[in-house]
Amino acid sequence: MHHELPKLPYALDALRPHISRETLEYHYGKHHATYVEKLNELVAGSDFEDAPLEDIVRFASGPLFNNGAQAWNHDFYWKCLSPKGGGMPSGELAEGLRKSFKTFDAFKSTFTTACENLFGSGWVWLSRTAQGGLAVQSAQGAGNPLRDGHKPLLACDVWEHAYYIDRRNARPEYVKAFWDLVNWEFVAQNWAAPLERHASSGADAAKHAGMARNQDAGEEKRAKP
């Protein structure tokens, strides 16, 4: 299966003044594109060659997981942003946040703190857990809640390439601007979609877990002198 770089849901300059055109030219046009390119190189001839991207995220390991997850994460992240974003959620999503965090401000504070405090590079997610509750989760590198059977609702990319051109190393300024772009309509759609849509069957899980073991064994064999 050949994976394509998805088209951005808005123009490169549409997120100004919060995120510049130059940042998107590099972040989307270089970094995201490179992850997709490397994914296609790595998946060719592997046990995951015909697997959907979400299964690569769930079950692969090593470089294939890293590039596959980064490709998936970035596509999801772009959809979490909108030129008409910001404000507060409403309806059932707002109620769900209140149930899990007491208030929207408490959720926002928890998410912001996770973004600012994550060491190194990674992602912060709002996810629906397998038990149906909501949780803020930090993940280093290419980490993704799908690995734990959770359903991603919202993501913030805190790799430096997401903000260095505009903010240098001032991650808190980037996170503050992020809230002015959040696409709550997209988050609400993720909230409303059945959790089962994001869960492979037990048979698929066993199959791909075996693929991952084979992949690890192959990489270990190639690494030996």
Image (cartoon, rainbow, N blue to C red):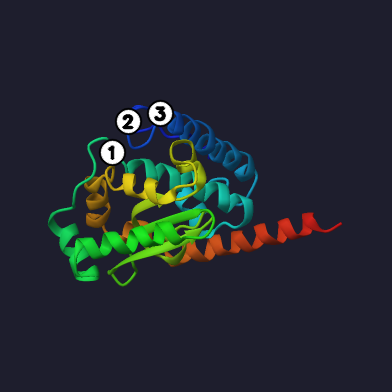
Between marks 3 and 2, how big is the CA–CA gap? 11 Å
| Amino acid type at mark 3 | Arg
Which mark's residue is nearer the viewer, 3 or 2? 3
Location of residue 59 in the rendering, given as x and y in whole percent from the top left corner: 53, 59
Q: Which residue is mark 3?
A: 21
Q: Nearer the viewer, residue 135 or 60?
A: 135
Which label's residue is closer to the chain start, 3 or 2?
Answer: 2
Which residue is drawn at the image coordinates 59% and 64% (left, top)? 210
Few, some or many residues within 10 Å of mark 1 (<14, 14–19, 20+): many
Q: Nearer the viewer, residue 51 or 120?
A: 120
Dot label at residue 10:
2
The residue most toward the right is 225
Which residue is drawn at the image coordinates 26% and 59% (left, top)? 194
Q: Which residue is mark 1?
A: 82
Q: Say if mark 1 contacts mark 2, CB within 8 Å.
A: yes
Secondary structure type for disc 3:
helix
Location of residue 117 in the rendering, given as x and y in whole percent from the top left corner: 45, 61
Location of residue 201 in the rendering, given as x and y in whole percent from the top left corner: 41, 63
Which residue is drawn at the image coordinates 54% and 56% (left, top)? 120
